[in-house]
Image (cartoon, helix red, strand yellow):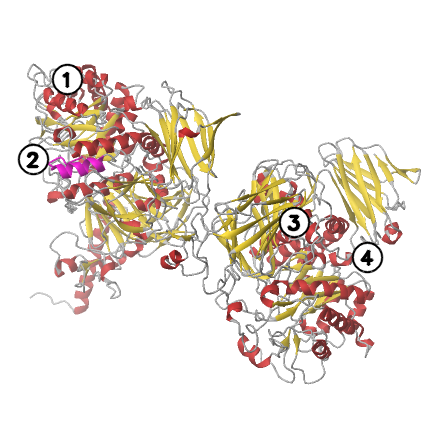
Amino acid sequence: MARKFSSLEITLFVLFILVLVVAIVLCVLLATNQQQTVPQDETQPFIPYCPFTVQDNDRIDCFPEEGAKKELCEARGCCWKPVTSGNGPWCYTASNVGYRIQEGQTETPTGFESKLHRLPSPSLYGKDIETLLLTAEMQTANRFRFKITDAYNHRFEVPHENIKPFNGPTAANPNYDVELKNNPFGITVVRKSTRTVLFDTSVGPLEFADQYIQITAKLPSHNIYGLGEHVHKHFRHDTNWKTWPIFSRDAFPNGGMHNLYGHHTFFMCLEGESGLAFGVFLLNSNAMEVELQPSPSVTYRIIGGVLDFYIFLGSSPEDVVREYLTLVGKPMMPPYWSLGFQLSRWGYKSLDEVKATVERNRKINIPYDIQITDIDYMEDKKDFTYDLEKFRYLPQFAHDLHSHGQRYIIILDPAISTQSLIGGPYHSYVRGMQMGVWINESDGKTPLLGEVWPGETVFPDYTNPQCVKWWINECEKFHQEIEYDGLWIDMNEVSSFKPGSIKGCTKNEWNNPPFIPRILDKLMYSKTLCMDAKQTLGKHYDLHSLYGHTMIVASDQAIKRVFPEKRSLILSRSTFAGSGKYAGHWLGDNAANWNDIKWAIPGMLEFSLFGIPYIGADICGFFDNTTEELCRRWMQVGAFYPFCRNHNAENYEPQDPAFFGENSLLVNSSRHYLNIRYTLLPYLYTLFHKAHVYGDTVVRPLLHEFSSDNATWTVDRQFLWGPGLLITPVLDPGAESAHAYIPDAVWYDYEIGAAVNSRKQFVNMPLPANKLGLHVRGGFIFPQQQPANTTFYSRKKPLSLLIALDEQGKARGELFWDDGETKDTFQKEMYILYHFSIMENILHIDVIKNGYTDPENLKFEEIRILGILSAPKSVNVTLGAQVTMIPPEYIKYNAITKVARLTGLQLLLGQSYTVQWDSQKFVKVDCHPEDDAHEPACRARGCTWARADSPAEPWCFYESAYGYIMNTAKGIKQTRNGMSVEIKRNTAYPKRFQKQTPTVETLQVDVRYLSDHMLNFKIFDPLEKRFEVPIQLNIPNTTVGNSDSRLYDVEFVNNPFGIQVKRKSTGTIIWNSQVPGFTFTDQFIQISNLLPSEYIYGFGETEHKSFLHNLNWHTWGMFAKDQPPGFKMNTYGSHPFYMGLEEEIEAHGVLLLNSNAMDVTLQPSPALTYRTVGGILDFYMFLGPTPEDVVKQYTSLIGRPVLPPYWSLGFQLCRYGYKNHKEVADLYRGMRNASIPYDVQHVDIDYMERQLDFTLDADDFQDLPDLFHQMRREGMRTIIILDPAISGNESRSYKAFTSGLQKNVFITWENSSEIIWGKVWPDLPNVTVDTTKDWDYQVKHYRSYAAFPDFFRNTTVDWWHAAIKDYYTNPSDPSKSVKFDGIWIDMNEPANFVHGSTEGCYDAKLNIPPYMPALESKHVGLHHKTLCMEGKQFLADGTAVRHYDVHNLYGWSQTKPTLKSLQNITGQRGVVVTRSTFPSSGQWAGHWLGDNTAAWNQMHKSIIGMMEFSLFGISYTGADICGFLQNTTYELCLRWMQLGAFYPYSRNHNGIGFQRQDPVAWNETFQNITRNILQTRYKLLPYLYTLMYEAHAGGSTVVRPLLHEFFEDKATWDIDRQFLWGAALMITPALDEGVNYVSAYIPDSRWYDWFTGERLRKRLNWIQMFTPLDHINVHVRGGYIIPWQDHGISTYHSRKNFLGLVVAMNDNDAAKGNLYWDDGQSIDTVERKEYFLAEFTVNQNTLQTSILHSNAKSTANELKLGYIDVWGAGLIPPTSVMVAYKNITYNITNFKHSPQLQKLTIEMKDHAFQIDVPLTIIW
């Protein structure tokens, strides 16, 4: 009886068996040396994760083959769910399959790498690879590569001859970021600049098996182009679940979705309307399919190789193609003759038939360069043979073609017959057998046999070097028989008529892989070879799609042997990435139908992307009989195929042009367009050069040039040659028009020359039977040549230029010219390269390279100009110094088409010329600058409507004659000091703003010559007085000399009227208002001016991003406003002054003296347009000729800058938000304890009672007078703020208001004595302000009614003086008097917290004029944040004026009375700082740049602002250091303190509610650095004060751009991150966060480091300056002497210290400098001559002082010279230092010399050398 086991025993037994099984499995795994381990959870059943959130369009197909069913799907571990709509898959991938990253990534010299481990899931097709290696390479800034392959086993990779291994280093600053997702694995490529995700594989799983690889990537748009070769019926892909197989195949391009001849995995994708694009290239030659789906996404399914992706970023589609071709190989440079017309057919029965075709086409006189013969010429279709019966005289035929200047191309197929020739052995086959050059069967030994045209064939293995050698020899031998000129290689997919071989194919994984992409027939070896066939480099399975490419490369080697010095041509049917480097391509065996003529265009555009620009389709169709209409239309468009060949098949009617009849419409049309083709061949050849050298496209889709225009994204029935020639064919039967898109540019009809009226729109283009749409783009110059019947003869003909002007009268172009056939002419520099450009009626024909002499002595004999507005006059041709005038009879002009022809030219090829003429220059002036411009409104104004190139450019613009014309009946009146003329409106155009504002029909124009360098011209209404700015200018008193001494000539020009001012010395016209659009109405005046260059500076007050203006259609409003600085926002002041530079190194300035609201538009012409809403046009011009001269001349007219007191150059502190006087006192004591130099303390409106002027907050600031008194005793100064608005709501007596009311000082309503009430800072009495309420609530409920003083009135000036005096002296309680030293006047635009008034405004015409300038909040009106424009004011003479006219003068009118009051009351010079300014404000006040923000970019903008106010004549300027608004940061504030130490007005100021930012609010390190830099400032104050004097006395600038001193160096013309103090001190601050180096330009001079005396060794160069956080770069210019003084805690103390001189030697060992000195505080010391002025000069080793002026009151006698520092003193130390002073010689012993620094330091403090006594120092 058997023993029964217990349940425990049974359990143990089962466990033992399980353990045993596991052990055995592990042993087996170890024995088989498996590297991968099975994850522990492998034994767990796989459950697919199928999130319900996956949208139908985002699904990734998990069952790409046919027959998907739920059970089959789920067996694969996939998700099954029917789609709700659309064509998406029901079976789709789960979210928990793919691979994961476990170990992270490892950095490599080229990027990084990481291993990928397969997630447990069922296998789709078997042989999954468990561990993959991801390799990423940041190859260039715009190219990223990532490769995924088996981590442990080699796999096939494409052996591409042009793609070399990348060895690093990685791109330093790529334009992309790469992000990895770990689980499941995904890789994402992001464009840095826009954060656009370009390529994201995390949207689907990675599958990687031995014979199935799948990867999906999300794309940013549906605008996908490329992938091939297929017939794509449209250029832009359809992303609605379209699957395209890629695998080279001999198939008909009949419109199906099957694979065709080539293998191209590259595609381009647009990123949106930005114009940005990127490209994707998968380097893989295995069979694959690519699916596009609506997400949009792309899925690759590949049956071998690796994933080797390259991502290319471009700023445009063209950039993307260039990047791609840089990798795979740029296109070959075709021979010139290959661009001619070609004839071919399959089916020539004999050579006689070929000859007949040639003769009849010669007879009809069509351009015709090449004859091709198909396989008919061969004996039994065998390569390297010709039919000795039917083509017996083929060698002689080739000679005949050559004798007629024509060429001959033969066809060769790869398949070689195994059969003998009729007369004996087939030697080509025999030699191939002997050399073993064929593809073998899978055994690697037996040649694989197939069947092609000759019957049984073998197939050369072009991966075998022996085969290449054989092929070269055969081509060479055959050329010795027949002198062909090029090779057409066909059937090289490779094609075979027997599937696989004559034996069939073995069934195995290569011939029958587990997954077959959707290739034609779904059979790998259909119409080709077995996939397991052996080639030298591997299996045909991997190499199949490379077959054509390897044949191309071998044929290229053959061509090099046959034509060792000449270019030939290879035309291949099968291509791969990079094939374009060697060959062209045609689009295969199309058919004679209307579909194929259409589909040829997308095909050409795609091969342009693929880098094969030599492309075309068989004209008139290959298969089927064509029709006359189809062939005619095809000949028209085919004339513009780069590869231009008419070719058809056997057994169909001939279709060469002559076959249709000598005088047929087809022949005439064909001849016409082929002649145009040949005329344009120099342009086409140049395009091929650019393709060859740079990777540009030749045939180009419209979207490449207009990528931001979404209408171009789908245009594929038109195409471009390069950027400039638009071809619009008729592609439909019976049509005599085409639905055509006119891109956003100026276009001209090529043949007629007239401009097209349409732009950026689709049109119905009439194109009768004989016409093709052919248009040239404005802005381009096309080199041309007279045509001939062949290029051999056309190249002997004269050249010409076709110039198509853009809207600005500009154009450019190029010509590349060589002998047309020598190899590598570019590399050998055997060519001519021209750059053509035209601007301002000057055509530059510039030879860039002249390495070739054309034997035909070619000349440019004609120039045709399209879009020229008037007949060219005085045409001059300049060659070197020789100037030739073209006779008038050689100048033709068609006023209707606006086309000019210049003939009879003899401009020799290879030489540079300029051609110049006088003609009207068209400037596009905006006719609808308001918002919402539209065509009907534009045309109602009599203007032109056309779409513009850029978003900022106007679409509505004036016609050329719009404006005024001279009254010729009255003529021009000339006087000794000026000229005048009457002008009338051109009534051919409608009035502007009819029924809104009256037009001034007649105007008076007066020109006054004010001096030799200054003039004034005024345009005004002679019949009715208009407002003019009431500013007293300093008009020169001297009588102007004769015209010879003037720097300028003035001329009135007509039609339209304009004023031209010409600089006589250079001939440059610096003002030219003969520009359309001049308008003069009561409330809208507009005038434009052509600028001599694009270098324009000034106009304010607005925040500009650069000192040099950007002329790209920027409009700047000028209207004083309480507006913190911001881009394009008008702020506090109005300065309609600019300085312009001229290319000839001259400068000029222009002031429009007009105080009305205005804007100025700067445009690229270059030109500017003024628009103002009132007044007159009153211009002043200053001729310089240097920038400093311009400012001096300008300030001589408006008034020189004020000389501030010395103490005001000290450091100043302020904040809005001091809680009480104790907070101010604590700050003061903290600064003193920290020993930080500090001179001035401000108080903001906090000190007032409820923000009322002339009050003191009795609760929080009651002791402020005592604090001010204490500060004054200790050498400090104080400044108070005053706003103009005066409260009128006081419940107790408020003298400022009551006395003002009594004296009638406030602005009132028009026609009324009622005050215009506003609201500003003053609060209502007896209310508690709830600061938590929003702003509008607080204004409405808490702010009192405020009145605004009219400072024009003399009574107001007296009232203001009395109010300030009362506050200063406080007669009722002198102990409470506030003794201040300066006044800060704010809110004087004037600012108003309600728009207009508390009751609104009444005159809509004034507050919202017909034209609202480009102002902040212009939609509200001019009264936004200020007074109603109808407010009434009175000038000093009693004249009533509207606030509308004087608003911009409000701050100006307050400034002078404030300074005069301050000085009268204090008896000292004092200082006024004003927020609102106008020209001449600088006579009385300084200015700060307003309520800036604590942001890094504000430091840079502060430099720009200071330099602009230097132009405006306001020297005492600065910005709020560390920023007024927002919280600053430690680093920002520290860097700003360094920069602010070099502001003339150096004040740290911030706003209420933000953290403290004064120096002692920070740590000790901050305080130390601040102390050091402020000590540097204080040390330099004698130099700064001298600069302030020079500005006051002579009008020079203090803060100065580099261009003012180094004007001849154009590199300085756009520098605004460095600046100068005067001529000698250069400041280069750190302006960016986190930097330790700054880029600095070193102008042409010696420069010494201020802190060390070390000399910079570079000049005229940019350098990197080390700038740690505790440092600012300050350099002294050689040739200058800088006076300095030991620093002190304030200027009160520093002025008592010894004076020193820094002598910075120049290259001639010389230097000079000045010192101005006075008591620092008395009034008008310069005017009363109570000052001291000395000049110091050094020559070699001697310093001398010269006293230029001295007055005892200057206190200079108290100033002692204690130090001399000589920088650049030489290597040899001096032996002595002697001082000659008061006729006594002193020997100075305290000196030292540094040979290393060449620095001499002399100390003389032990001698009392007074500075006001001349002395001489010798060392």
Q: Which residues are the magenta region?
A: 619-638
Mark 1 nearby-residue class (10 Å; few <14, some 14–19, many ≥20)? many
Say whether disc 4 or disc 1 marks the residue closer to the N-terminus.
1
Residue 636 counted in the magenta span = yes
Q: Do the residues labelled 3 and 2 touch (CB within 8 Å)?
A: no
In the image, what residue occupies the spot 45% across and 62% down? 994
Image disc number at residue 1693 = 4
Give the amino acid at mark 2.
Gly
Q: How far apart are marks 4 and 3 (CA)?
A: 25 Å
Q: Which of marks 2 and 1 is nearer the N terminus?
A: 1
Amino acid type of disc 3? Ile
Specify whether residue 1283 is painted magenta: no
Residue 636 point in image, percent of width and height: 21, 36
| x then y, percent, for residue 1312 | 61, 77
Q: Earlier in the sequence, mark 2 or mark 4?
A: 2
Instruction: Say which label, 4 or 3, has the lower sequence index.
Output: 3
Circle 2 sits in a helix, a strand or a loop, which is it?
A: loop
Residue 1073 placement, left or right of 566: right
Question: Contact, CB < 8 Å: mark 2 with mark 1?
Answer: no
Mark number displayed over residue 504: 2
Q: Residue 1672 carries which label?
A: 3
Image quarter hosting the N terminus: bottom left
- Element under disc 1: helix
Asked if marks 4 and 3 touch (Cβ < 8 Å), the reply is no
Residue 27 on image: x %, y %: 23, 49
Helix, strand or loop at disc 3?
Answer: loop
